[in-house]
Amino acid sequence: MPRSHRLPGRGLGTMSEKQPEGLAQCLRCNAKSKRSGVRCNSPAIRGKTKCRMHGGTSTGPSEAGKQRLSDLHMIHGNYTRDERRHTARVSAVLRAARDLLKRERG
């Protein structure tokens, strides 16, 4: 909600009024709302430009996390890397056989 629409007497008021001194001086999140275009203005994570709610703490999944996601998303095993390699080899053999038959026929 844009600041102009906020009711007087609600919220924290000015930055330095009711917040600890360090919090009032810290960098603010620069994430913007798609609807209103207003910045988030929550305190950004140290060394980042986003707050904890907009991805400032995320550094991406770890290798163990990627493996867990991979295991979770494999339901039937038809599309594993090994299965795709096998399918590619079989397709190459079939393609070569088809081309050979076409050449033999004329």
Image (cartoon, helix red, strand yellow):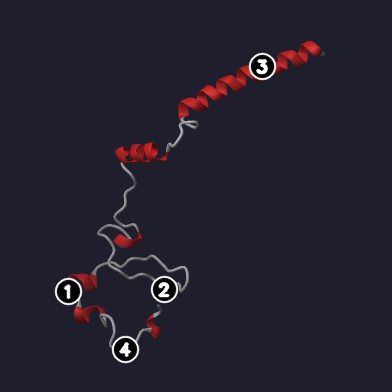
Marks 4 and 2, Cα distance to the nearest angstrom? 18 Å
Q: Secondary structure at mark 1?
A: loop
Q: Position of residue 26 (x, y in %)?
A: 24, 68
Q: Residue furthest right?
A: 106
Q: Which residue is mark 2?
A: 38
- Labels 4, 1: front one: 4
Query: Horizontal and vertical percent for residue 61?
Result: 33, 44
The nearer-to-camera label among 4 and 2 is 4
The numbered mark at residue 8 is 4
State yes or no: discs 3 and 1 in contact (Cβ < 8 Å): no
Q: Earlier in the sequence, mark 2 or mark 1?
A: 1
Disc 1 residue type (three-letter): Pro
9 lies above or below 63? below
Crowd around label 3: few <14 · some 14–19 · many ≥20 (10 Å): few
- Sequence-earlier tag: 2 or 3: 2
Left or right: residue 84 compared with residue 72 = right
> Can residue 86 be seen?
yes
Amino acid identity at mark 2: Val
